[in-house]
Amino acid sequence: MGSEPSEAYVSRIASYKGLTALVTGASSGIGRLLALRFSHEGARVALVARRAAELESLAAGIRAAGSEALALPCDVSDLVSVEQACTQAIARFGAIDLLVNNAGYGHHRAFLEWDLADMERMMRVNYLGTLYFTRLLLPQMVEHRRGWIVFMASVAGRIGTPEEAAYAATKFAMVGLAEALSIELEDAGIHVLTVCPGVIRTPFFDAEALERMPPVARRRFVEPEKLVEAILKALARGKRELTYPRSISVAYLVKALAPGFMRTQVKRATLGARSRGRTAAGRVR
Ligand SMILES: NC(=O)c1ccc[n+]([C@@H]2O[C@H](COP(=O)([O-])OP(=O)(O)OC[C@H]3O[C@@H](n4cnc5c(N)ncnc54)[C@H](OP(=O)(O)O)[C@@H]3O)[C@@H](O)[C@H]2O)c1
């Protein structure tokens, strides 16, 4: 007598052959590498970002390697564009099995120096873009009783850090959405993976961001290929959360058990490091 496959079994991606993935933020960094890797593993990929030329060149490379790819230029903060992208992706591929909500950007800035319009835009891109794609692609996943949704959040979505307030808010919002949906959608056959990367070497950090970055963070850069590898492993194992590098997860425990201590450590590593840097520079002069 055959037994029902366990929840853990159906939540795992055993093979990418026959799957279709839609990756937002596919023109650069983590999203670009993820799309390349999915296609290498046999998936068809829909590529979303604003820069059409980058997407077309990535799609051409994927097709030249023998896989299927569709470039869908789109600003994820614009609902009408997102609707068009989803319609085009489904029309071309029939269904989207794997959605990666990855498009996003961030700044390091003292709150009062931060332009209000930029803070609002960041929420639209990082959070509302995620909400739109999830809401629009979920019905066909539920209908097929199969789907995976990856939320590219951040450690900044678990631990609030000075001079990242508006960015952290977008990522806390993503983590909340993902955590709740993970439970709500489980019985519908939809698996949610929340990814919280630490500091990954991508164009996310421009010269200004690198300049403002606390030394402790600058020393912890990880290559994006390693993160992508960890994401594929997490999907293969049916994991629901991935913080990468994994060692950072200890900080969540410290925050829960000793919040006062955690606060002091975060302040010391960020604002404290900056004022020590200023003092040292002053002495040199
Ligand atoms: N790098 C890190 O250390 C790190 C750490 C934690 C979390 N993350 C998260 O990882 C994700 C990917 O970042 P990354 O490091 O790969 O940075 P990246 O190389 O700058 O890539 C960001 C991607 O998002 C796209 N994007 C930005 N605004 C968009 C919009 N309005 N509409 C559509 N696409 C948009 C960009 O494409 P276009 O410019 O072509 O639109 C680009 O493809 C982000 O959500 C980021 O918050 C990164």
Image (cartoon, rainbow, N blue to C red):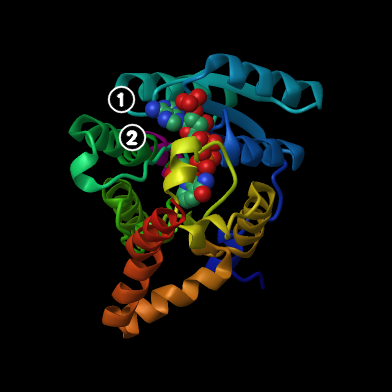
Q: Determine the residue positioned at 59% across, 54% down.
A: 221
Amino acid residing under circle 1: Leu
Q: Residue furthest right?
A: 65
Magenta stretch: dominant secondary structure: helix
Amino acid residing under circle 2: Tyr
- Location of residue 169 with respect to 75 vertically, above or below: below
Q: How many marks?
A: 2
Whichever of labels 2 and 1 marks the residue nearer the N terminus, that label is 1
Name the secondary structure under disc 1: helix
Name the image quarter holding the N terminus.
bottom right
Q: Looking at the picture, how far across and down is residue 260, in whole percent? A: 26, 80
According to the picture, the residue beneath numbered tag 2 turns out to be 132
The reply to whether residue 18 is visible in this rendering is no
Q: Looking at the picture, how far across and down is residue 126, in whole percent? A: 36, 39
Q: Looking at the picture, how far across and down is residue 2, in whole percent? A: 66, 69
Q: Residue furthest front?
A: 285
Viewer-closest of 264 and 196:
264
- The quadrant holding residue 92 is top right
Q: Is residue 139 magenta?
A: yes
Q: Is residue 29 left or right of residue 119?
A: right
Q: Is residue 109 magenta?
A: no
Range drawn in magenta: 136-142
Q: Is residue 112 left or right of residue 118?
A: left
Viewer-closest of 211 and 137:
211
Viewer-closest of 270 and 144:
270
Q: Determine the residue positioned at 22% across, 46% down.
A: 111
Q: Are marks 2 and 1 in contact (CB under 8 Å)?
A: yes
Q: Determine the residue positioned at 65% across, 24% down.
A: 69
- Tag shown at residue 285: none
- Tag shown at residue 79: 1
